[in-house]
Image: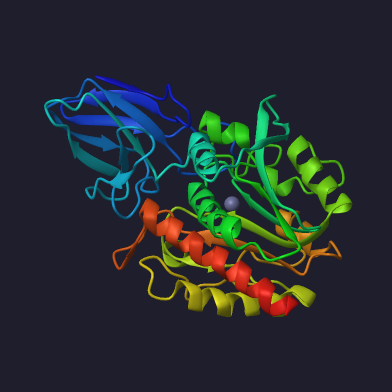
Amino acid sequence: MFIHQNFTGGNITFERVEGDVVYIERQIRDTEGDWFYWAFCAEGCAGRTLTFLFPSTRRVGKFGAAVSHDLKNWHWSDSGSEDRFTYTFAEDEDKVYFAHDMVYLPDRFERFCAGHGLQTETFCKSFRGRDLPALRFGSGDKWILMTSRHHACESPGSYMLEGSTEVLIDHLPEGYSVLAIPYVDYDGVLDGDQGKSRLPHDHNRDYIDEPIYEVIRKIKEFSLTHDVRYVFDLHAPWHTGEEHDHVYLLHGRGRMAEPVFRFSDILKKESAGLELNYTGERDIDINSKWNGYPGGPSCRGYFCTVPSVELCLATETTYSGRPEAKVSQEALLNMGRAFGRSVVSYIESKDA
Ligand SMILES: [Zn+2]
């Protein structure tokens, strides 16, 4: 048996095996406090039924582990509880990937772009010196900025970004262009970091006067040199429970309050009837929970202060959902497409 993290996005510590129980734990790395991302490969387990056990109840989602044989297609194991999941390996099943959720790796976005005749560009260098990709399209002077993975582990945000982008490629309102940055914390995505609450601070907390991450410096620079009208920052929330099993928005204050409500109404209609939809019932009001004012620095907080920006919002998309609204890769993409249609509809109604 070989349990390892030797692949893009891998994150696991293998502790020991006792009988059919495999003791494992996620690596917290440079994150302060607890977080729950893990992804590992199990080899040499063919024909066995094994239980993978974590030392914490905050590790396994509603439907067990996400399972994949190629790191592209994921389904739930549908077996498990908060600290464990069980899996029966077929006789010829030599290599299986398991993860906290349906991990979205960079090659997926590259394939998506290629499928639409587009190519990513290098936006800047990542913190660890890699070429950080972004996608630009459109010929207008007004810009829509879409971002995900300010927190590396938040894959649902990238499915939302892909679904939205797909709609925008075909239905971009006249006069607009799109800049999509699918992996703001690119290193964290590739290296399998939590990314959230990194020390000294994570990418979303880097919207300060002197950012430590070049990507945040470049995003801020972009906002000064381009007419940015719309900003959508796509996150995933806490592991599970309460609003975290839903898709929800963070409401804005001041001049951003009304636009967010308006967008929310459109998104409700566009996503109605989807397996995973948005109802608005779990949104976080301003000054409620962690959506405080003034709050810490953030992408959303920063762009709310940029005068050209008409609407800036952050979404939180559940990792696993609920029995009646279960996450799958297609459900996440469909929610993303509904989001994209909402962006188009919002802009068209605004500019009409
Ligand atoms: Zn986040």
**Quadrant (top left, top right, bottom left, bottom right) of the N terminus:** top left
Which residue is at a point 36% across and 48% down the rendered structure image?
57
Horizontal placement of 325 versus 349: left or right?
left
State the quadrant of the C terminus: bottom right
Residue 37: image location, x then y, percent? 46, 41
Foreground of the two, 348 or 270: 348
* Residue 266 appears in the picture as rendered: yes
In the image, residue 275 sits, relative to residue 299, either above or below, namely below
Q: Residue at x 53, y 41 (%)?
A: 109
Residue 301 is left or right of residue 68, and the answer is: right
Q: Is residue 281 visible?
A: no
Residue 310 vertical position relative to residue 231 in the rendered view, above or below: below
Q: Where's residue 245, x and y in %?
A: 42, 63
259 relative position to 106: left or right: right
Q: Residue at x 64, y 62 (%)?
A: 172
Residue 189's place in the image compared with 264, above or below, is above
Q: How many numbered marks have been drawn onto this rendered protein structure?
A: 0
**Residue 272 location (% of width, % of height):** 43, 76
- Residue 203, above or below 16: below
Structure colour scheme: rainbow
Q: Examine the image and state in which quarter residue 47 appears.
A: top left
Q: Quadrant of residue 256?
A: bottom right
Point out residue 284 in the picture as x, y percentages from the top left corner: 58, 71
Q: Give whichever of 344, 296 is nearer the camera.
A: 344
Whether residue 176 sits left or right of residue 282 in the image: it is right
Q: Residue at x 39, y 43 (%)?
A: 100
